[in-house]
Image: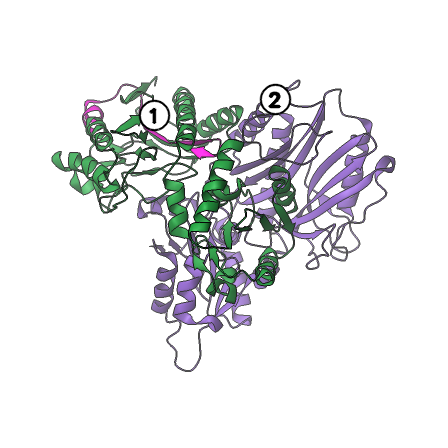
Amino acid sequence: MRRGLISWSREEVPQAILEARVARLQQAMREARLDAVLAYTSFAQPAPVQWLTHFVPYWSEALAVVLPHGAPMLLAALTPRVHPWIREVSHLGEVVSAPRLGEKTGEFLREQGLGDRADSKARIGVIGLDGLPWSVGEPLVKAFGEDSLVDASALYAQLRQTADRAELDLAKRATAIGEAALLAIPAGATRAAEVLAAIEASARRAGAEEVLLRIAPDFTRNATLSRMEGDAPLGERYAVELSVAYKGSWVRVNRCVASGGEPLSWQTSSRWLTDAAASLSVAQAAPRFADVPGGGALNAWTLETSVGVYPLSVVAAHDRPPVAALSAGGLAVLSVELALPDGPWRGSVPLAVAADGRESISLAS
Amino acid sequence: MSAQLHQERSGRLRRAMADAGLDLLVVPGDAWHSDYLRYALDLTPMEGEAIACIERDGAARVFVASHAEAARFAAEQPAVQVSCSADPLAQAEAWIAARGAAQAALVAPGVAPTRLARGPLGAGMTAATAWFDRLMVRKSAAEADAVARATALADAGYAVFRDAARVGCSEYELIAEVEAWFRSQGCPENFVILGTGGREVRGMHPPGDRRIAAGDLVTTELTPCVDGYYAQICRTLVVGEPTDTQLRAYAVYREALEAGIAAVRPGATHGDVARAQNDVFRRHGLGDYVTSAYTRVRGHGVGLFVDGPHVLENVELVLEPDMTLIVHPNTYHPEAGYMVLGDTVRVTASGCDVLTGTTRDLISVPA
């Protein structure tokens, strides 16, 4: 569940920014001849609804209905008891109680006049149609027919390509929270739980909406990051990946720790990664990697952005070609795993993608 | 999660598949709906979708999109074959089609991705939700022991919460203290909501930026996880000395909780447990406040998550030894505001053991 700070700061995410995002979607809907766009949300699939309305369910599920005009409406399976809270933390039109979310959505769309026209079928776009839970998808298929439901994922992804000012600032804030949390790791820590608790405390006290932690407690022996249920002794080297959300903006940051102090190879690798991140641009959707420092090997890399229903989606990787060109001003996270002569190293750089001929900008300090 | 619990559950799952005549079980999951996957394979998705396919002999594979999740799954469960691709749904579909299982079932089709459930493969699969839910609700002694350990952690976590709930502390700072403490104990997951304020508060929510003030009621529901099993505690505290109104109101909740717990025994139903609590409210003229207009859920199973149906008057789930549940008469009181009180219990041969150890008194902390 989401258990960090959920609040809507009108200064950080102005109402006008949210309305502009909805307006862009509505313009795209008209061009695509869509009568409505549905965006499902749970804390596992929060991205589109949070981007459009600032709402994220800490629990349960909901669905935003965007019609060609007007504010998005939210059908929420959450108890009506929390509707005042929903209104407090998000920018929405009507909020409708929908314990049976799929059925209620079908009824609601009928009430809006969709599916009633004799001459043509309604065209209803669904962001993330393939991954929509069947408890929601099935009643919609029954109500409107398979052909009426159109996957609006690509349309949404296109809108998310360029970050607005608020997104950029939130991503910078998320990065700063993450970096500070990794610096809060106590020197001389001996247990994984000690490290993770310090990170958790720092990030959540700083207002993180969510914190996901993975750790390789004995990094030299095993570089795989684990979820860590329980505890483990720390080896001489360990690595932590922190995924942190701040008001819907997600970034990843990493820290590798060596008991004898940070080796020179890690400092060199960090600069190498920054250079690789800078190489990304509209014309360069996969990073240009220079030779790995010290004759090491690049074991794996991923480039993630917020173009899907999940907070971050892999859009290019060592084993996958880029799914699409990057857009100038888009937000991304480049992560790498290196095999250096003196052991493994990993790092991540949150960044804003550059226009052609320029260097992408790292959001890290 | 302990290897013993994992093996025990795997054995039960294989027997259930054999009883149902299944060759293949398809188990979808994500960060929200992870309990089926955890039961089956002891895998907990943190991000993205995971589709698991489990064969009758226990051989299993999982399809995911995230490289990090794929690497983690492979390391956590080396016997499970993990496939990572840009389109795990398509990959899962292709694998299922190529395998050509005669008898396949889909666990929790409502949770499953629409593409998987509505395609030709989905149509050819039966739903395995009911018997899988029974597996999760009917616990072994070892599973109930894990819930007991989680309850002890919930008690200790509530002590941290109580000590951190002070005037000027914001809701999210308060929860940060609790989350950090749970992490220090090796607990990665916790369901938590809270409420702060007075009579105007009508429920709980995730932490916001409101700061605690003198005289506030501070309610919370903490639900930490140990060895993959959750337990819950619900408590209310007052910042400062409780008023006579608060004490009088709270006495109803305590009476209701005790009545609910007294109703927990083998053969009783969730409905019996709910009625016992609601009757107390009705006797005090507060019957309206245990309806859907306010809060009507009087508890729920606890285990790999909130398992089984809620504790409601119309739920006929029959209790059996080693089932574990929380009994919580949480609702709004018209004179005092939203109050909560709940204990996790374990059904025994003749009644139940109350696992929660925290005082049931209305707690007061310095203003």
Mark 1 Cα shell of 10 Å, populated few (<14), some (14-19), many (≥20): many
The quadrant in which residue B204 appears is top left
Subunit ID for the residue under disc 2: A
Image height check: is A142 above or below B325?
below
Residue B242, x across and y down, in percent: 25, 21
Rendered location of residue B231, percent (x, y): 39, 31
Identify which residue is drawn at 34% across, 25% down: B355
Quadrant in the rendering for residue B325 = top left
Chain under disc 1: B
- The residue at which mark 2 appears reads as A191
Q: What secondary structure is found at the residue carrying circle 1? A: loop
As for residue A155 lying within the magenta part, the answer is no
Circle 2 packing at 10 Å, graded few (<14), some (14-19), many (20+), is: some
- The kind of residue tagged 1 is Leu
Chain B display color: green
At 37% from the left and 75% from the top, the residue drawn is A116
**What residue is pinned by disc 1?**
B355
- Magenta region: B223-249
Disc 2 residue type? Arg
* Discs 1 and 2 carry the same chain letter: no
Q: Is residue A273 left or right of residue B242?
A: right
Q: Nearer the viewer, mark 1 or mark 2?
A: 1
Q: Nearer the viewer, residue A288 or A239?
A: A239
Q: Is residue A361 above or below residue A183?
A: below
Q: Position of residue B279 (x, y in %)?
A: 16, 37
Which quadrant: the C terminus of chain A? top right
- The tag on residue B137 is none
User: Disc 1 versus disc 2: distance between alpha carbons?
Assistant: 29 Å
Figure check: B180 above or below A273: above
Can residue A9 be seen by looking at this rendering? no
The colour one sees for chain A in the rendered image is: purple
Residue occupying the point 55% across, 66% down: A28
